[in-house]
Image (cartoon, rainbow, N blue to C red):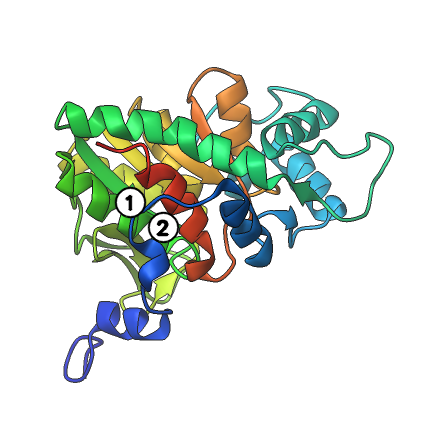
Amino acid sequence: MGPYDGGMDLEQAHAARLPSIDDRWTPRPYPRDELVAGLLRGRVAGPVSHPLDNVRGNVRLLNEGDPDKQFGMSGVAGAFDDERVVELMGELAGATPDPAARTGVVFVDAEAVLQACERMASRLAEACERHETVVLATGHPAGLIHLYAEIGRRMATAGASIARPGEGRTWSDDDRDHPWQIRYLWSVAMLTDTHSPKHTHSGEPMRRMLEDARPDLVVADHGFAGAAIEAGVEAVSVADVNDPALIVARALGRTEHVVVMDDNVQPDAYWPCFQAVAALLP
């Protein structure tokens, strides 16, 4: 029996494992301190899950040319020295680590997250007003899926066209004993092995999606965002503190909007980010 024969299909099975969308996701005004508290309570901001030694290690791997850390982009490896990349991350996170420190907790400022979401929202509002075609995709289908899906739903009601390029496209890699496939949960693309969604840094899924359509804007993370940037498609993206490639791309002027926060906590924890975005959409 194949993965879609009988019972719930892949998307239904994944959705069933996720928290439900509750009334926190209904667009309405919230006091700023309540949004800040929500981000801290959900560990989206504050002391995040990746310690400084992990952040520095990934920066080093990027600069050494590790393909997994480049997120499908050329020119990001070695663009800045390790210490400058850590500084760039800290600037976007609103809390720069001590240059002398090699271990310890990394902090993200909740207000910096909300401000970055609002700057991103200004671009999303333009997409709605211009009736642009938008693609949403995530390499963290267990983390960011609610945020992107609800942004997509809100944008669709405000005039944007949400596209699903590459849906069902399948390919194989020589070093894998299973195929890869692009699937959509709600309006959000994700990489699967045809049985379950997968965390990925690869730019290959977005490269294949862009063979089907060239949207005006991509809302994504990891290689989905990186491959769009590499192809010259405008992207707004989310990056974790230990994901330096998109942060470097921004510093190089290749992309404008990068929200730095913990990108893989519980999916319902991102409701304050959604509210910050939804408040500025038409």
Q: Measured from the top left, where is residue 60 in percent x and y?
A: 69, 35
Q: Residue at x 36, y 40 (%)?
A: 220
Q: Is residue 236 left or right of residue 240?
A: left
| Secondary element at tag 1 | helix
Question: Looking at the image, which residue sits at the far top?
Answer: 253
| Secondary element at tag 2 | helix
Q: Measured from the top left, where is residue 212 in percent x and y?
A: 14, 38
Gap between marks 2 and 1 measured at Cα: 6 Å
Q: Residue at x 36, y 69 (%)?
A: 18
User: Taking 72 as reference, is 187 above or below it?
Assistant: below
Q: Marks 1 and 2: in contact by CB < 8 Å?
A: yes
Q: Is residue 270 left or right of residue 206?
A: right
Q: Nearer the viewer, residue 162 or 79?
A: 162
The residue tagged 1 is 151
Q: Residue at x 17, y 52 (%)?
A: 167
* Amino acid under disc 1: Ile
Q: Is residue 177 left or right of residue 50?
A: left
Is residue 132 visible to the viewer in this orientation of the structure?
yes
Q: Residue at x 44, y 57 (%)?
A: 143
Q: Measured from the top left, where is residue 129 in percent x and y?
A: 16, 25
Which corner quadrant of the image does residue 133 belong to?
A: top left
- Quadrant of the drawing holding the C terminus: top left
The residue tagged 2 is 147
Crowding near the residue tagged with mark 2, few <14, some 14–19, many ≥20 C-alpha atoms within 10 Å: many
Crowding near the residue tagged with mark 1, few <14, some 14–19, many ≥20 C-alpha atoms within 10 Å: many
* Amino acid under disc 2: Leu
Is residue 226 visible to the viewer in this orientation of the structure?
no
